[in-house]
Image (cartoon, rainbow, N blue to C red):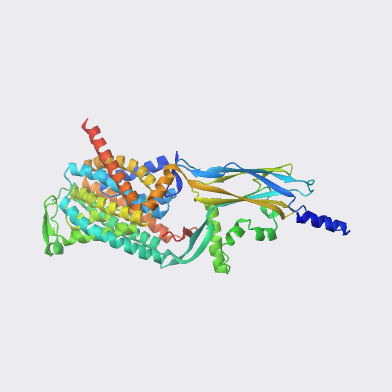
Amino acid sequence: MQVYLPIAEVSVNMFLLLGLGGLVGVLSGMFGVGGGFLITPLLFFVGISPAVAVATSANQIVASSFSALLAHLRRKTVDLRMGTVLLIGGLIGSGFGVMLFNYLKALGQVDLMVNLCYVVFLGIVGTLMLVESLRAMRRNKINAPKPRRQRGWVSTLPFKMRFRTSGLYISVIPPVLVGLFVGVLSAIMGVGGGFIMVPAMIYLLGMPTKVVIGTSLYQILFVTAFTTLLHATTNQTVDIALAVLLILGGVIGAQFGTSIGAKMRPESLRVLLAALVLLVCAKLGLELLLPPSEIFSVAPAGAQ
Amino acid sequence: MIAPRLVLVAALIGLCAPMPPAQAQEDIVLGLSQESISITADFSGSDLLIFGAIKRETPIPAAPLEVVITVAGPLTPLVVRRKERRYGIWINTESEVIDAAPSFYAIATSAPLETVISAKDDLRERISIPRAVRAYTARLLNPRGKDFADAVIRIRTAEGAFKLLDGAVDVTENTLFNTAISLPANLTEGTYNVRIFLARQGEVITSHETDIVVRKVGLEQFLFNLSHRQPLVYGLLSLALAILAGWGASALFRLIRER
């Protein structure tokens, strides 16, 4: 059944969109990532323009992350205090990221920048996670005790704060910086930034894996809500009809994802996420390296 | 009234010049399946039927009559970019702005286009796809610019936005003609210009023009207008819907699980 999208101005199969939303929802619930890094490229394939895809996927992430966050709140696996500190950095970073985005747009290099960001960050994060979680799995098999985490320079910084849920007493500087960095990326790449934040929380801040997902969802919710509003007011590229269809599929998928995630071992969860991240990275990387079949591209001018 | 009078004068002074071709003595009477196209929520493209008859007061000339019908969408500005390999990756290097290019262009003919319309008349009336597009890319005449203009034609043709339908017009008894042109689902809103040309031996005898308006209606129009006139309200509405859906799904699933 075809449905015409008022802002995207294309007609797309309704069940295809519901399916896309559902798939991304499952991943979102399982891994605590918003799924923006998957849904945005998938929407390009369906024939939706990049501007509308980025803005609308931000809106869809609001719904799926809210739904998943509620499930985590009930299980008390959200560090609200840490989430708020991350969020403060995130909002500042997102505002700065939008300025950077507009500057690159004026230069005509925004597509390249977005693709490079995806390849570089997905590549680094995916590799690190894969290596670390495979090592962790091997350790668990021989039942060796986990070595105590080394914190090094992070523990020497001032402005310490107690994060009870995470069982941490650390400086607020690293979480604010992590939030800031993720905010910038989320504005440029049109994603929630969970795939950067989850590993940063685990490896940099030393938070327990169980709390990480709920806390990252909390931060993602507010940053993507802010991004949606920014896109709606500056570019008018949020397609509400498209968002509703993706959300319908997504919220259902997220619920399944959360229960799947709760049953799986954190290490296997991380291996899966790492594999997924590397797959998307390889796909985007190949697009940059292989000669395109059409070296010209056409885009509407003066969209602003 | 001038033309017949001139013919009369020519005949009276005894010039034995042959009768000029039946200029303006054949007129087009046109019908369209729809005067306007409404884009609704279930819009998935539309077939535009164009039909008509040729009204004439003289006997049908011996040479076969050919019909060419063009449909052109609203003009929109474009940026065309070219990729090049730099530092091992393919990046956009050069670009050209085209101030206006038709968002849609279809030609239906009763016989292969190049046999129906001479190059001269094509140039004057801008009928074929390259002529219709190049009318707006006159600035890009140097070889480099031509690559960019050609790219627009190539990409839009591959997308199905530009199409040449040779032989898609049926002509009956040199008098009645009809064709169907399918319009894609991703129509740009605006005025679509329909032109009908009658041609004999490669020359355009007469032509006729009319417009079709394509616009969104109902919910589609409401949402589009709201997003442009009240962007903040629209944005908040999108967020409210998202939060409501997220909460609704969560509550529903808890209900199911607690059973």
Q: Is residue A207 left or right of residue A250?
A: left
Res. A238 in view: yes
Residue found farthest to the bottom: B142
Residue A144 in picture, x, y percent from top left: 14, 50
The front one of B97 and A141 is B97
Q: Residue at x 24, y 40 (%)?
A: A259
Which residue is at 31% across, 53% downward?
A229
Total residue callouts: 0
Residue B142, placed above or below residue A176: below
Residue A123 locus on image (x, y percent): 31, 58
Looking at the image, residue B57 sits to the left or right of residue B91; the answer is right
Q: Quadrant of residue A161?
A: bottom left
| Residue located at (19% from left, 44% from top) | A73
Q: Nearer the viewer, residue B27 or A234?
A: B27
Q: Position of residue A269 (x, y in %)?
A: 25, 47
Residue A237 visible to the viewer: no
